[in-house]
Amino acid sequence: MNIRHAVEKDLQGIVDIYNDAIEYTTATFDLEKVSIEARKGWFDEHVHRYPLIVAVKGEKIVGYATLSPYNKKEAYSKTVELSVYVDREERGQGIGRALMDEILHLAKENEHRAVISLITKGNEHSISMHKRYGFFLCGELKEVGYKFDQWQDVLLYQLLIK
């Protein structure tokens, strides 16, 4: 497996993983599948201080991670939101950890101070992985998303980069 910065030709694999998450998980609160065209603008925003990396096995994209602006107000410029997605068929093989290692390294390299992850309550695998990296629970938002015919709570996890 190789971890590298994403290039535009990776969009199909990224979209496939994301659409699977839309359809089958609460990892995202998007409700409708996205197209490559719809994700092109999102892709273009992930440069320099806000990287988008992919995990690749052979020619297949098996996961990706991003850092995004947490809030566009200037005072938040050193705070980023982290997202990690792994292909359903590839989970449990260390891909998420490898992506976390690299994206957190890039966060430090880009001099970010705080990394925020919003995790839907009940996603114990994601919570456990974040805790392993030193993220701590700093809040819970009750019933902020409605997906799969029920209200979803979101947990806010934070890591301060020293």
Image (cartoon, grey):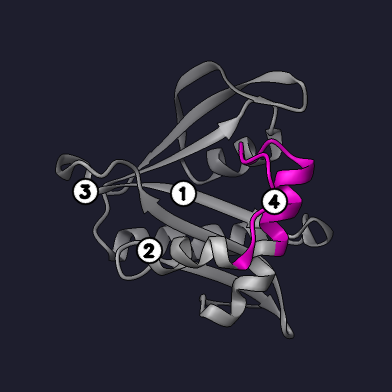
Q: Residue at x 47, y 29 (%)?
A: 156
Q: Position of residue 119 (x, y in %)?
A: 57, 34
- The location of residue 126, given as percent across then percent down, is 64, 41
Asked whether the beta carbons under mark 1 and mark 3 sit within 8 Å of each other, the answer is no
Mark 1 and mark 3 lie on one chain; the one further toward the N terminus is: 3
Q: Which numbered disc, 1 or 2, marks the residue that appears first in the sequence?
A: 2
Residue type at mark 4 is: Lys
Residue at mark 3: 77
Viewer-side residue, 38 vs 67: 38
Callout 1 environment at 10 Å: few (<14), some (14 to 19), or many (20+)?
Answer: many
In the image: residue 87, left or right of residue 84 = right
Task: Report the residue marked by disc 1.
Answer: 82
What residue does disc 2 label?
A: 45
Q: Quadrant of residue 25?
A: top right
Tell whether label 4 touches label 3 (CB within 8 Å). no
Tell which circle, 2 or 3, labels the residue nearer the N-terminal end: 2
- The local crowd at label 2, few if under 14, some if 14 to 19, many if 20 or more residues have their Cα within 10 Å, is some
The residue lying toward the viewer, choosing from 29 and 82, is 29
